[in-house]
Image: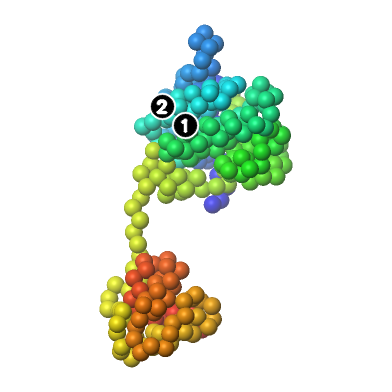
Amino acid sequence: MSTVQGLDISACQTSVDFKKVKAAGYSFVILRLNEWDRNKRDIVKDSRFEEYYKAARAAGLMVGAYYFTYANTIDYVKYEAETAIGWLKGKQFEYPIWFDLEREQQFDQGKSFCDAAVNTFCQTLEKAGYYTGVYCSTFWYTKCVSEAVRERYACWIAEWSSKCSYKGSYGMWQNGTAYVDGVSGAVDHDYCYVDYPKIIKEKGLNGFIKPPVTEKILDKGSCYKLGETTVGALAVKELLRLAYAKGLVSIKVGDSKTYDAETVKAVGELQKKWGYKETGGAGVNFVRKLYKALL
């Protein structure tokens, strides 16, 4: 996948024309899912989330979401995750649902807390059918989250610089802010290097339905099958013995004068290796493909 550019947007961006964002060359937006209500002293849905979600989709932009965690206990992380699932329900997201970890009160509790917070939020969403990941800065992610946990989930790394210095694997990089036609004021800018839409849709996550698997059949016509003793069937066995000698197949076909069970298994192994349904029957296409492999 070629690198694509996107923006992360919240109610802080008071005016957004998503059609202009799309026209400016951006492929996706990551929308903030929540904010803190000081009066309620609790999390609430971002006041523009519903509006921006509908507008972004209408403009043809792909969408993800991020949840800014305010949790100082793992019980509250669990509450946040369950709340997030309720807000996400009924929508589709081509990009991951990101757990935004960036408060010093959380980092001050050390790796054990941060690891548990990440695992709790992400695994709760995974069980609900969402593709998740973690947003964090290079410094704090490296310092306060163990490598095992960092490599377990998709990573959206934040480092406002001309070059990302994060040593682990990451799929997105927030490199700073930009002024974009259609957005009021400066907005966070992101690069994405992973084809998340393809992964998410193929797995049937984030509100998408997993497409049915259509098995390819190499030979739909007549095939040599179990029990046959024709010259052609025995010729297939000879080709399979050559394939075994060259390391193309792991099953050694014997010298019997019939298309036996070992032959069926060896043919099936090659069919699977080539990306076809294992039928065990060898037809014209199988013979041609095996012959070319032996050359």
Q: Nearer the viewer, residue 278 or 43?
A: 278
Q: Position of residue 127 (x, y in %)?
A: 44, 37
Callout 2 amino acid: Gly
Answer with the quarter of the image where residue 263 lies: bottom left
Residue that protrudes farthest toward the top in the picture: 39
Residue 103 lies left or right of residue 225; in this view the side is: right
Residue 135 lies left or right of residue 255; in this view the side is: right
Can you say whether 264 is above or below 182 in the image?
below
Residue 86 - label: 2
Query: Circle 1 is placed at which residue position?
Result: 18
Residue at (63% x, 46% y) in the render: 169
Element assignment for label 1: helix
Q: Position of residue 87 (x, y in %)?
A: 42, 26
Q: Position of residue 119 (x, y in %)?
A: 56, 35
Dot 2 or dot 1, earlier in sequence? 1
Colour convention of the picture? rainbow
Residue 144 lies left or right of residue 71; in this view the side is: right
Callout 1 amino acid: Phe
Can you say whether 13 is above or below 26 in the image?
above
Residue that protrudes farthest toward the left in the picture: 222
Residue 279 appears in the picture as rendered:
yes
